Every structure is written in structure tokens, then in C-alpha cells.
Image (tube, coloured by chain):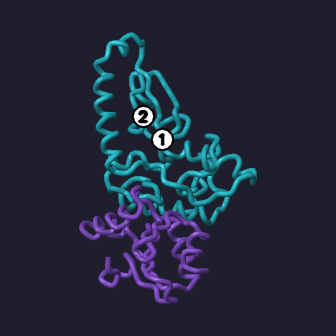
Chain colours: A purple, B cyan
Amino acid sequence: MDVSTLDKEKGNHISGIDRGKVVMYGLSTCVWCNKTKKLLTDLGVDFDFIYVDKLEGEEENQAVDEVRRFNPSTSFPTTVINGEKAIVGFKEREIREALGF
Amino acid sequence: MVDKVYRRLNDQVEKSGYHLNPDVEFTKDLVRGLLANEQRYGYWSCPCRLSANNLEEDLDIVCPCYYRDPDLNDYGACYCALYVSDEVIRGERRVESIPERRPPKAQRDAERAEEKKRAEMMESMEFTEKLSKPVWRCKVCGYLCAMDEPPGVCPICKARKERFEHFM
């Protein structure tokens, strides 16, 4: 999903150090999702975030399908790295390691 | 508003023997999420799960959710960590992000259909007639009562009537 087409409150690109394509799918009301977003921000990596609860209709279905492909239980946060590895939940150590910290 | 709801919830939860997460800022953020969901959907959908914006589909994740007690037993906290166990309160266990216990949508839909069938069967089964009253089970905390109808609110955990199932 191309976040540049979304309203900023629904999803956005955060510029930073290039550690590959990082996409965090989260919910705006979820404390674990916001901890994950803060961790990525503090690490200073380049990433996209998408607040799936803010999406509707086709956009929401598309985002849910993307999450399900990596995480069948479709839970949040799901952080996808380079379209191949997914980290489910706020797993600080795993996220740091996967991004080379 | 958040402070008021937090205090009221905390009083009620402590009275029924449960505990909110002692990290007050964390917990207030979750209360903010619950209030946002009440605004958006009309009920306290779990702030850490995607709502279907449909109460029937979300009945299992209305806070407190059906998964709270098993998660408190296995991980010391519920999925969003609004509720924590005695061990966490005593400082013997740390709260962290836990795996999702809620089954995927396809499985939930199948289970709901199954349950509906079972409920209809129970209505017509003979052994029910042998009990002087039907027995209702609160799906949040397991409370059982034998009455013509389930109570309006669970006396143990305050879950509402629609979260009771016809148990026997």
C-alpha cells in the first residue's frame, strides 16, 4: 500500500536511515503499536506506518490482506521488513536485531 | 474525562478481584483508546484489536474480552495489558506484548454459526426440561446462574446480558 496516497492521520512515511523497506501496520488506539512506532522513530530508520483502524472500505481490506499474508491472525502491530520478514507485536529486541542495531 | 473513567473503572475492577495495569500512564492511554472506540463504534472494543464495527462480530473483544482470563493465567496480562495478574502486581512477573489468542475471522465465523446451532438445539432438548431452571454462563468470567433469564449485568465482572450463553 502506497502511504503517500493516504491522509497523514491514516498513514505516513517517516524519513530516516535506510535499513530496507520497513512498514508498520498498527491501530491508532493500541499502546503496543504506538510503542513500536516510537521505537522505529527513536532508532531513526526510514519507515511507513499505516493505522488500519483509520482506514475504510477498499483501503481497509487491502491493508488487512497485506497483514494477513505475513501474519494469519491479523493482529497488530505487524512490522514487515523488506516484504519478507514480519515481526508481530512489540518485540523490541527482535526489531532492533532485524534492523541491524 | 479519561481520569474520571480510569478511577471509576479501577474501583470497579478492584472490587471484583481483578487489577488494572499499575503503569497508570499506559493504562490511561488504553482508557483513551476505549473511549475513542466507544465514540466510533458505540461499544468498548479492545483498543489493540481491529473492530468490525459490528457488535455481534465483536462481542468477544468488548472489554473485558473473552480472552482476558486465559491470558492472565498464561501471560500475567490480557492482550492489550489493561488487566494484569496478582503476580504482576506483586512484582514477580513483567508485562510484555503477548501472542494473539483470538482465532482468525474465518474460524470465528464458523464457531459463531456452530454456537447458534447449539443454542437452538438446547432450546429443544429434553434434559433442559428436567432442570427446574436453565443455567446461564458469563463468557467473560465463567459465572453461572440458574434463572429464567441471564442477569442484566454479571454480578461478578459486570459484563452485560448479551455476553451470557445458555450453558445447560
Q: Nearer the viewer, residue A16 or B31?
A: A16
In the rendered image, residue B163, in percent from the top left (x then y), is placed at: 41, 38
Disc 2 target residue: B164
State whether residue A49 is above or below residue B133: below
State whether residue B41 is above or below residue A97: above
Disc 1 target residue: B159
In the rendered image, residue B70, in percent from the top left (x then y), is placed at: 55, 43
Q: Chain of mark 2?
A: B
On the rendered structure, is B4 left or right of B92? left
Q: Secondary structure at mark 1?
A: loop
In the rendered image, residue A18, in percent from the top left (x then y), is placed at: 49, 88
Quadrant of image for the N terminus of chain A: bottom left
**Residue visible at 45% across and 67% down?**
A78
- Check disc 1: other Cα within 10 Å, few if <14, some if 14-19, many if 20+: many
* Amino acid at circle 2: Phe
Mark earlier in primary sequence (2, 1): 1
